[in-house]
Image (cartoon, rainbow, N blue to C red):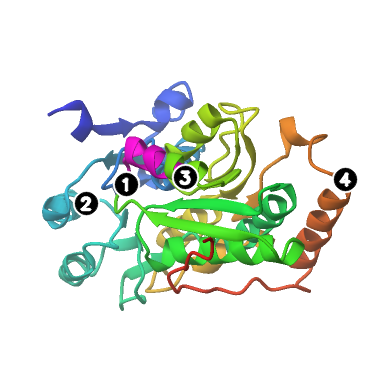
Amino acid sequence: MTPSRRRALIVAAAVLGGTLAASPAFAQTRLKVAAIYTVPVEQQWVSRIDKALKAAVARGEIDYVFSENVANADYERVMRQYAEAGHQLIVGESFAVEAAARKVAKDYPKTAFLMGSSGKPQAPNFSVFDNYIQEPAYLTGMIAGGMTRSNKIGMVGGYPIPEVNRLMNAFMAGAKEVNPKVEFMVTFINSWFDPPKAKEAAFAMIDRGADIMYAERFGVSDAAKERKVLAIGNVIDTQAQYPDTVVASALWHMEPTIDAALKAVKAGSFKAEDYGHHSHMKVKGSSLSPLGTFEKRIPADLVAKVRTREKDILDGKFSVKVDDAQPKPTAR
């Protein structure tokens, strides 16, 4: 098996020093969990799922295996293999394989499936989730709108699907709140993981005057760094890698989603549900990243506006619209 298709088995005993693995009673309480990813596990979106599952491993709650870089044509086969192997919870991303994934779930009604999906839950055992992080995306938009000098922001996304569109639209709305004059360039590279292609798309926008880039995909921040413009991150915080480039990021925390699913499986109460609300800021499913190296570089009045809006969101006084329509460029 090639490294790109490796399956990593993470054993809780290795994390806990082997002390609990010796107990048969404890071993029986650990759930068998498998995850199926169509991209490398290092990719932003998938890395958040992996991180949350590894946290459950560290707590001694689960045994966890995963397959990465699984082609769409192979997805159903891999799902069936994990179900046949007795995994109690299977986590994945069924956006491009909805019909096949739902068919597998029907064939294994006693297995719990928690799948990233644009569709609805399917009884009795197919639950869905997504990164509903439009709230912190709105806040990063406010920062970008207040920081741009050219009033032109470039945005590079993977595919124009609801999961991407809603974040871009929220970002654009946030930018417009503080700067009605801002204009946007929007490009989709039609790939979830192609940093060179994303980088080239970003270069083209910077050449047209964009001085802040919305980095929905890997590669955009590299272009921003090379051309000495700013960038806004998405899903993960990459400021440590780009301390003079990435101003802030909308972070996704998958732990509330995973923890809720594990609790349901353990209790024997897992059913078809939409787990999307576990990504909201008020339940710590998402957040605005620390400003870090830009703490003193962002104007104080802009920071104050962002913090006020952040508090409004957490207090339920302000709601960020969920707009899944494909965002349209407005820059000339």
Say what amino acid the circle numbered 3 marks: Arg
Badge 2 crowding class, 10 Å Cα cut-off, few under 14, some 14 to 19, many 20 or more, is some
Q: From the viewer's perspective, is residue 78 above or below residue 115?
A: above
**Residue that badge 2 annotates:** 86
Cα–Cα gap, marks 2 and 1: 7 Å
Q: Would you say 238 lies left or right of 122 here?
A: right
**Label 4 vs 1, first from the N-terminus:** 1
Kindly indicate the quadrant of the structure image that contains residue 285. Answer: bottom right
Kindly indicate the quadrant of the structure image that contains residue 69. Answer: top left
Q: 311 or 92: which is nearer to us?
A: 311
Kindly indicate the quadrant of the structure image that contains residue 50. Answer: top left
- Dot 1 falls on a residue whose secondary structure is strand
Q: Is residue 198 magenta?
A: yes
- In the rendered image, the residue lying farthest to the top is 17
Magenta region, residue range: 192-202
Q: Residue at x 69, y 73 (%)?
A: 319
Q: Would you say 225 lies left or right of 116 here?
A: right
Coordinates of residue 229 in the picture (x, y in percent): 60, 36
Cα–Cα gap, marks 4 and 1: 49 Å
* Label ID, residue 48: 3
Quarter of the N terminus within the rendering: top left
**Residue that badge 1 annotates:** 32
Q: From the viewer's perspective, is residue 290 above or below residue 6?
A: below
